[in-house]
């Protein structure tokens, strides 16, 4: 229901924007844009064709430019940056936190990057360089070095006076981090505990060391999994010596989870989640051509298998009529298993420890569904063509194909992962090939043996 409401609201906003832009009235557009959050503005910009997108982008409050740029795909961001003056880009970058700036900096022209770095003070420039030194999909790249630390040998009163002197807290601050003299992470201190205890209470008595720190080299996917498992709002990041380097906050993790979901959905169709919805025709066609070519090659393989049974198809036309049923059912069954496997691999739920049990379960599911639907399809085919042998042939082929589909649905993504190929991107094409080839071969092979033998 919430998703439907959001979709309706976005569609309504898009309709209002388009009508106002078509009529040339920019006042309503400006008012609407100024009521939206940066993420909502980014979503609307991605929904507009380039011409209208440029007009709306020019009406966005300059204070929101940096945040909006972070909430659009790489290709859309590239186009928006191309329409900005260097001074505008520098101003937008200055408003961002260090971790967000690190993400944006990679898309900026080299000359603009130098201007951004020159505009920063020495401390923030060093922090940015530290974050950029880590791999892109790591905890080090996600973390924000702006973190409040306290010592365990002071009292609540000392910490409160320090916070008042500081004047403000970083966004999403739910805990302060307690460190040793060498800046090693010891634990966390909740703001609630700080506010509800006597001023002379030592911080060591309020220390919570239950939350493990995240290693700076941890993958972004693993970071997202830990946040999801433990319902964290923020988490400390440390190096190999347990030195506190920064923290990761929930807003960055939500972005990772959304990107993972988009990647799984679009990757299954061979599409890039960062591509512009209104990307130029030539560019879009070029991107999609590769996977269309791969699919065509696999289709020729399936056609070659069919061609090996040309004589049988000429004599028993019913085989040609029923072929799509066998291939389609195998494809659907395999896709169901493949989807579960891709999700399980992404969440770290699938490994050699549970592979045998998972494989046995999916094979049994394939056998059960294969036998059930084989009986149904076999009966329908026998009644339709008045041929019990034909019904038996398609029933046997259906059972074989659903069994193989379950097997392939488990093994194909594992094999691709082993070869360092993204299962979400290539798994569907390979699986479809397997179910088509096995389905056609089993159906037409059995048909040739039993009906024409």
Image (cartoon, rainbow, N blue to C red):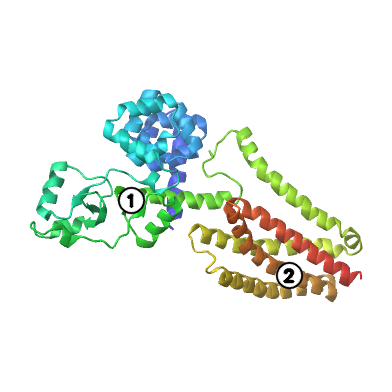
Q: Position of residue 431 (x, y in %)?
A: 67, 58
Q: Nearer the viewer, mark 1 or mark 2?
A: 1
Q: Would you say residue 35 is visible in this rendering?
A: no
Q: Position of residue 144 (x, y in %)?
A: 32, 44
For disc 2, the neighbor class at 10 Å (few under 14, some 14 to 19, many from 20) is: many
Q: Position of residue 324 (x, y in %)?
A: 75, 60
Q: Which residue is mark 1?
A: 237
Left or right, 393 with respect to 82, comes to right
Q: Position of residue 323 (x, y in %)?
A: 78, 62
Query: Residue at point 28% right, 31% down?
Result: 122
Q: Find numbered disc 1 in the image and state the secondary structure of the residue it sits on.
A: strand
Left or right, 116 with respect to 306, comes to left
Look at the picture and state if 169 lies above or below 334.
above
Name which quarter of the figure residue 340 lies in.
bottom right
Which disc number belongs to residue 164?
none
How many marks on residues? 2
Pick the residue in front: 201 or 296: 201
Left or right, 57 with respect to 265, comes to left
Query: Residue at point 32% right, 59% down?
Result: 212
Left or right, 398 with respect to 246, comes to right
Look at the picture and state if 220 lies above or below 288.
below
Q: Which residue is mark 2?
A: 400
Q: Find numbered disc 2 in the image and state the secondary structure of the residue it sits on.
A: helix
Query: Residue at point 83% right, 71% down?
Result: 390
For disc 1, the neighbor class at 10 Å (few under 14, some 14 to 19, many from 20) is: many
Pick the residue in front: 21 or 23: 21
Measured Cα–Cα span from mark 1 to mark 2: 51 Å
Q: Quadrant of the N terminus?
A: bottom left
> Which callout, 1 or 2, points at the residue further toward the start of the chain?
1
């Amino acid at each position: 229901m919430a998703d439907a409401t959001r979709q309706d609201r976005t569609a309504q906003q898009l309709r209002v924007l388009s009508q106002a832009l078509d009529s040339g009235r920019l006042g309503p557009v400006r008012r609407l844009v100024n009521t939206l959050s940066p993420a909502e503005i980014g979503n609307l910009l991605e929904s507009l064709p380039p011409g209208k997108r440029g007009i709306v982008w020019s009406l966005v409050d300059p204070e929101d430019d940096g945040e909006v740029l972070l909430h659009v795909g790489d290709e859309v961001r590239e186009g928006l940056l191309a329409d900005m003056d260097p001074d505008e880009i520098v101003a937008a970058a200055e408003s961002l936190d260090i971790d967000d700036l690190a993400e944006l900096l990679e898309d900026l022209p080299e000359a603009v990057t130098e201007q951004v770095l020159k505009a920063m003070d020495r401390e923030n420039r060093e922090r940015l360089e530290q974050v950029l030194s880590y791999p892109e999909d790591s905890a080090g790249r996600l973390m924000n070095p702006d973190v409040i630390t306290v010592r365990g040998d002071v009292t609540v009163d000392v910490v409160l006076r320090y916070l008042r002197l500081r004047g403000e807290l970083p966004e999403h601050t739910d805990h302060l981090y307690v460190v040793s003299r060498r800046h090693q992470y010891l634990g966390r201190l909740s703001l609630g505990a700080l506010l509800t205890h006597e001023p002379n209470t030592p911080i060591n008595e309020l220390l919570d060391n239950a939350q493990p720190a995240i290693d700076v080299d941890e993958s972004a996917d693993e970071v997202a999994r830990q946040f999801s498992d433990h319902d964290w709002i923020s988490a400390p990041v440390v190096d190999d010596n347990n030195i506190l380097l920064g923290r990761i906050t929930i807003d960055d993790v939500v972005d990772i989870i959304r990107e993972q979901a988009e990647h799984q959905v679009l990757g299954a169709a061979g599409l890039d989640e960062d591509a512009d919805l209104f990307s130029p025709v030539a560019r879009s066609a070029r991107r999609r051509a590769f996977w269309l070519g791969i699919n065509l090659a696999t289709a020729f393989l399936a056609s070659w298998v069919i061609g090996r049974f040309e004589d049988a198809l000429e004599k028993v036309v019913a085989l040609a009529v029923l072929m799509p049923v066998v291939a389609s059912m195998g494809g659907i069954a395999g896709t169901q298993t493949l989807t579960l496997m891709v999700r399980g691999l992404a969440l770290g739920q699938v490994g050699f420890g549970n592979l045998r049990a998972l494989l046995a379960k999916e094979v049994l599911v394939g056998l059960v569904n294969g036998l059930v639907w084989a009986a149904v399809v076999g009966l329908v085919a026998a009644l339709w063509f008045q041929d019990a042998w034909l019904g038996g042939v398609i029933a046997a082929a259906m059972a074989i194909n659903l069994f193989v589909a379950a097997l392939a649905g488990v093994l194909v993504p594992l094999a691709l992962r082993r070869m360092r190929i993204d299962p979400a991107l290539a798994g569907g094409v390979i699986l479809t090939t397997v179910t088509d080839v096995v389905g056609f071969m089993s159906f037409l092979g059995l048909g040739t043996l039993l009906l024409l033998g």
